[in-house]
Image (cartoon, rainbow, N blue to C red):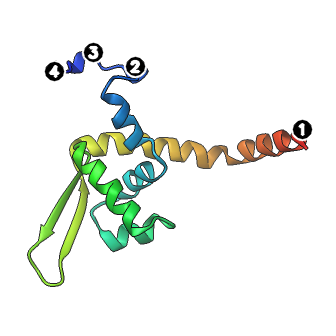
Amino acid sequence: MQFMAATANVYNRNCPSREVVGVIASHWGSLVLGALLDGTLRFGELRRTVNGISEKMLAQTLQALERNGLVHREVHPVIPPHVDYTLTPLGVQVSRQVRGLFDWITGSMPEILTAQQAYDTSRA
């Protein structure tokens, strides 16, 4: 049975959209999407930008983003290999949403830190 896109429901555990949510909303997926919104980057540049990500995790994340049509991978026929990663039009759309979330988080950090401290204090 073929899945009908019109019936996508991320709250349904059997819906393939759940996998997409997992890729986009993952720790590394959202950070890579946010980084690529500034433009095309090579693997090493992405790794430096998304501080703390391992080579293996970056490779897996990029593959998942590419599989879902969010990132385009272009291999240049040179030695050493030169590979560029760029957002697709669909990737740009979701990256703007991710960047909006990041901006909200950054702007809300004083309140978030206050809430965390109050929570931790009440649990001590």
Q: Amino acid at mark 4?
A: Gln
Lower position in the chain sequence, tag 1 or tag 3: 3
Q: Amino acid at mark 1?
A: Ser
How far is mark 1 from mark 3, CA to CA?
A: 44 Å
Q: Amino acid at mark 2?
A: Asn
- Mark number, residue 52: none
Quarter of the image for the N terminus: give it: top left
- Mark number, residue 2: 4
Which residue does the numbered mark 1 point to in the structure image? 122
Disc 3, SS: helix
Residue 24: percent from left, percent from top: 39, 42
In the foreground, 7 or 48: 7
Which residue does the numbered mark 3 point to in the structure image? 7
How far is mark 1 from mark 2, CA to CA?
A: 35 Å
Examine the rendered structure and indicate whether residue 92 appears above or below residue 74: above
Single out the mark in the foreground, 2 or 3.
Answer: 2
Disc 4, SS: loop
Disc 2, SS: loop
Residue 40: percent from left, percent from top: 27, 63
Single out the mark in the foreground, 4 or 3.
Answer: 4
Residue visible at 30% across and 49% down in the picture: 64
